[in-house]
Image (tube, rainbow, N blue to C red):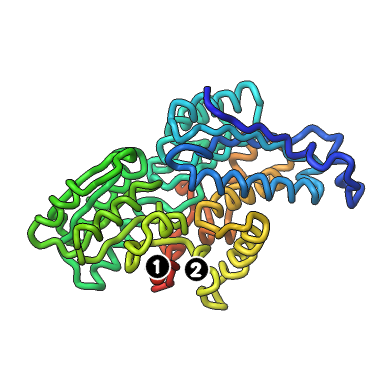
């Protein structure tokens, strides 16, 4: 069935002295069950592994503070390895056997979409950590998401290209989930903005080399920039092959690579690459007046202090999902799934790692394009451009 981790957060620290009577009462109460299916291993592990760490860290912290509604939180995580069929199986197990109150996951667009039909049938609120716009467009009653959409990423990149006077581009994308959706959104956004796509290539997440596709792009007349839409190791391979071919036009990536792991994998080839990202990766560079700055600065500090590793955009997604869920349960006054669903939909003015979130019956993400920043890789680090 695949590797899995099942963690009963409220049992951790047995024997420790709880700080208050509220916490003691929480031990005896029925737990609030939060289920999660993440890609902790496999090609998307650099996304799923920090997501798992964040959920565990902040569920433990919530329990130390007495839980929610005087009840402890039980966190159950399954590792789908990035496989859609496993994600669907684990989501069903979480709903039917583990009797969870809320679902957080999946890591990728593909694993999320595999689980969406089950969440809708079982009427269990699901908050996705993935970016694909099909997750929330069209709106689905029980499904929400916290990251920016691939369309927003395409809009941010195309806008930056127009500022640089770029009118003809090449598109290269991964032939699955996030890459496919991002490709389609980019084609639409480019058309709307008068940008001509003169070359359009695809690759598989398992491809060890994409020189053939990039050579076609290099030989296409008029290419002024290249935009890659993908996640995992693929974009790093694209970046290295791009430089190996001596290509010098601007190279853009999507927010699917907003992690230092991408820079490490791509090495010096990443120098000068631009991409849209959340404020979390450039927390110290945000303006003092930015309402996100204290939130992302605190989260970055806590994560890096705890795990001794640099924070990524992806680590912030489960933090936002968890805070939105716990606040919704608190407002609902129970774990009644319909009431919690309604309260998630009413989320307004929440300032998280991805930006300010205000959802509605017609918007199950709640982020505006202003939540995105354009960044550039310089000397192995992110530099804020706007």
Extreme residue toward the bottom, this view:
288
**First in sequence: mark 2 or mark 1?**
2
Q: Quadrant of residue 300?
A: bottom right
What residue sits 45% from the left and 47% below the top? 362
- The location of residue 42, given as percent across then percent down, is 46, 37
What percent of the width, then of the height, locates residue 79?
Answer: 55, 33
Residue 375, numbered circle: 1
Check disc 2 and report the residue beneath it.
282
Can residue 154 be seen here? The reply is yes
Q: Foreground residue, 33 or 8?
A: 8
How many marks the image carries: the answer is 2
Q: Is residue 193 above or below residue 323?
A: below
Q: Is residue 122 above or below residue 106?
A: above
Residue 349 shows in the view: no
Q: Determine whether label 2 and label 1 are within 8 Å by CB.
A: yes
Per the rendering, the mark at residue 231 is: none
Q: Secondary structure at mark 2?
A: helix
Residue at 20% in and 66% down: 248
Mark 2, residues whose alpha carbon is within 10 Å: few (<14), some, or many (≥20)? many
177 left or right, relative to 334: left
Q: CA distance from mark 2 to mark 1?
A: 8 Å
Residue depicted at 44% across the width and 26% down the height:
85
| Residue 196 shown left or right of residue 329 in the figure | left
Please tell me which residue lies in front, 346 or 181: 181
Which quadrant of the view contains residue 383?
bottom left
């Amino acid at each position: 069935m695949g590797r899995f981790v099942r963690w009963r957060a409220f049992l951790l620290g047995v024997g420790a002295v709880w700080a208050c009577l509220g916490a003691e009462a929480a031990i005896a109460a029925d737990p609030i069950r939060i289920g999660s299916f993440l890609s902790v291993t496999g090609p998307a592990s650099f996304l799923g592994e920090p997501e798992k760490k964040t959920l565990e860290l902040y569920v433990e912290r919530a329990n130390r503070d007495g839980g929610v509604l005087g009840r402890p939180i039980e966190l159950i995580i399954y590792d789908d390895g990035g496989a859609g069929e496993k994600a669907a199986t684990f989501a069903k197990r979480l709903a039917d056997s583990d009797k969870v109150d809320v679902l957080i996951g999946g890591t990728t667009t593909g694993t999320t979409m595999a689980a969406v039909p089950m969440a809708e049938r079982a009427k269990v609120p699901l908050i996705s950590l993935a970016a694909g716009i099909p997750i929330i467009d069209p709106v689905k009653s029980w499904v929400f998401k916290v990251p920016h959409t691939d369309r927003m990423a395409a809009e941010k990149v195309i806008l930056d290209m127009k500022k640089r006077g770029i009118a003809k581009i090449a598109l290269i994308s991964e032939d699955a989930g996030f890459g496919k959706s991002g490709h389609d959104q980019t084609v639409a956004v480019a058309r709307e903005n008068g940008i001509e796509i003169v070359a359009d290539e695809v690759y598989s997440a398992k491809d060890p080399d994409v020189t053939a596709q990039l050579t076609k792009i290099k030989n296409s007349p008029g290419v002024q920039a290249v935009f890659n839409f993908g996640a995992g190791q693929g974009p790093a391979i694209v970046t290295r092959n791009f430089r190996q071919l001596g290509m010098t036009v601007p190279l853009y990536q999507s927010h699917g690579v907003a992690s230092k792991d991408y820079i490490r994998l791509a090495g010096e080839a990443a120098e000068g690459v631009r991409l849209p990202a959340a404020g979390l990766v450039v927390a110290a560079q945000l303006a003092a007046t930015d309402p996100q700055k204290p939130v992302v600065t605190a989260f970055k500090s806590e994560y890096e202090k705890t795990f001794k590793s640099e924070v990524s955009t992806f680590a912030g997604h489960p933090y936002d999902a968890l805070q939105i869920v716990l606040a919704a349960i608190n407002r609902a006054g129970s774990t009644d799934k319909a009431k919690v669903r309604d309260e998630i939909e009413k989320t307004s003015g929440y300032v998280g790692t991805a930006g300010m979130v205000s959802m509605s019956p017609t918007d199950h993400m709640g982020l505006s394009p202003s939540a995105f920043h354009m960044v550039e890789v310089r000397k192995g680090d992110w530099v804020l451009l706007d």
